[in-house]
Image (cartoon, rainbow, N blue to C red):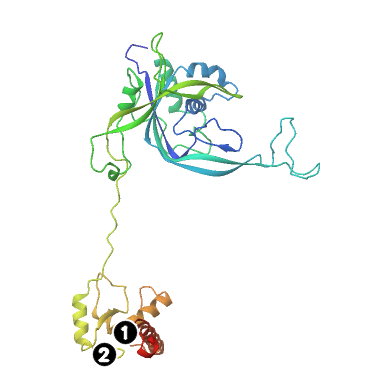
Amino acid sequence: MGASAPNTLFLRLEGPLQSWGDNSKFVIRRTHEAPTKSGVMGLICCAMGVPRQAAICRLRELNELRVGVRIDRAGTRWWDYHTVGAKIGILRADGEGIKRTGGGRHDPVETLITRREYLCDASFLVALRGDPRLIADVRDALSNPTWPVFLGRKACPPATPILAREGPGRFDDLQRALAHPPWQPRLESENAPRKRHVCKRCLIEWQASHEGDTAAQDAEVWYDAPVSFDPPVHEPRLVQRDQVKVRVGCALQHSTPTPRRPRPSYEAQRQQRLCKDKGLCVFCKSSQRVEAHHVTYRRAGGDETVDDLRLLCHLCHDAVTMIEYGENMGLDRINPEDPSWRDRIIQKRDEIVAFRSLGTERRHPRAEEAN
């Protein structure tokens, strides 16, 4: 390949759940804060169709790739209840299956209960930098993977294509590469007030460029450079934390406006009803605090008519409304002029009056009760 051939490939690792194995063992399986080199190499081997047992030969070449991770969205850590060995069992060091406590020879083997940690709703931009020929091979494999790829564990499928929209490019180092693709907020509100650039945290794999180069004192040792997947063997590598300034791109999603809810606009019909009912409650004939009551909402906010309303005083309106809520009524409501509702409305009026009278007595007790 020519001198201008791309030496950097971008991967977008984003999904509902991700888990990038830490050095934890046995029943508690934690996750790193970002994709590990072992996880990324395993993803590539899966796309290439390389079995775990045969990966040791291909990993020698893939480990030459330098890995940089930009944390676009850190996500939230979640725990999962998990069992291992159902109907298969867990083997002891001597090769025998673990039996239930106090069980006999033919008792079923035990399952192992584990706690597994995941990153929920995280998004990472991974930059792979290395030989252009190897970069081309990896790009071709991810464009047409042999086996389905996943984000650390098989239960974590990606939510977006693994190959980022930004195609392969040529960069002098991983810092410049990770600063090149714009950061896209999920919603426009995530970038308020509007900014043109933001700083994003990065994890950069350190390798000596010249003989005698030394890493910074704050470099971290990550034991995630894979030598073999079966059995799992990893070597250490140095990772440096950094920040890059990136341009802000367009939002990935646009907020959907709340649909307009029709509101009853019945002032004209209310005035007509006031005239028709002579300003009196149709139930008790009171003229105090009368208001319009809907006997149906089928035409609310549209072709509402004066026959959809009835005048009620405040007390009768409260009684009718409480009965309607108790009956869980829909669009069609109580017509207070209907004789079949008369007894229930009177009963509810009496309950309201008694309750309000009791409240008044509690707030203002009589003199003989206060003493």
Residue 130 percent across, percent down from the top left: 41, 17
Q: Is residue 110 toward the left or the right of residue 158 in the image?
A: right
Extreme residue toward the right, this view? 105
Q: Residues within 10 Å of mark 2 (few under 14, many from 20)?
A: some
Asked if disc 2 and disc 1 are in contact, CB closer than 8 Å, the reply is yes
**Dividing the image into 4 quarters, which one contains the N terminus?**
top left
| Element type where label 1 sits in the image | helix
Q: Quadrant of residue 351?
A: bottom left
Point out the residue furthest to the front here: 371
Which residue is pictured at 59% across the width and 33% down the height?
Answer: 25
Seen from the viewer's position, the closer of residues 216 and 14 is 216
- Residue at the extreme top of the image, as rendered: 211
The amino acid pointed to by label 1 is Leu
Q: Position of residue 96 (x, y in %)?
A: 75, 34
Q: Give percent across and percent down for residue 137.
A: 44, 20
Q: Residues within 10 Å of mark 1 (few under 14, many from 20)?
A: many
- Whether residue 331 is situated above or below residue 368 in the rendered picture: above
Mark seen at residue 286: 2
Instruction: Please tell me whether mark 2 sits on a helix, a strand or a loop.
Output: loop
* Residue that numbered label 1 is attached to: 315
First reached walking from the N terminus: tag 2 or tag 1: 2
User: Identity of the amino acid at label 2?
Assistant: Ser
Residue 241 horizontal side relative to residue 57, left or right: left
Q: Picture quarter containing residue 164?
A: top left
* Residue 86 placement, left or right of 287: right
Q: How many marks?
A: 2
Q: Quadrant of the C terminus?
A: bottom left
Image quadrant where residue 289 sits: bottom left
Disc 2 and disc 1: Cα gap in Å? 10 Å
Q: Position of residue 273 (x, y in %)?
A: 22, 83
Compared with 157, 262 (above or below) is: below
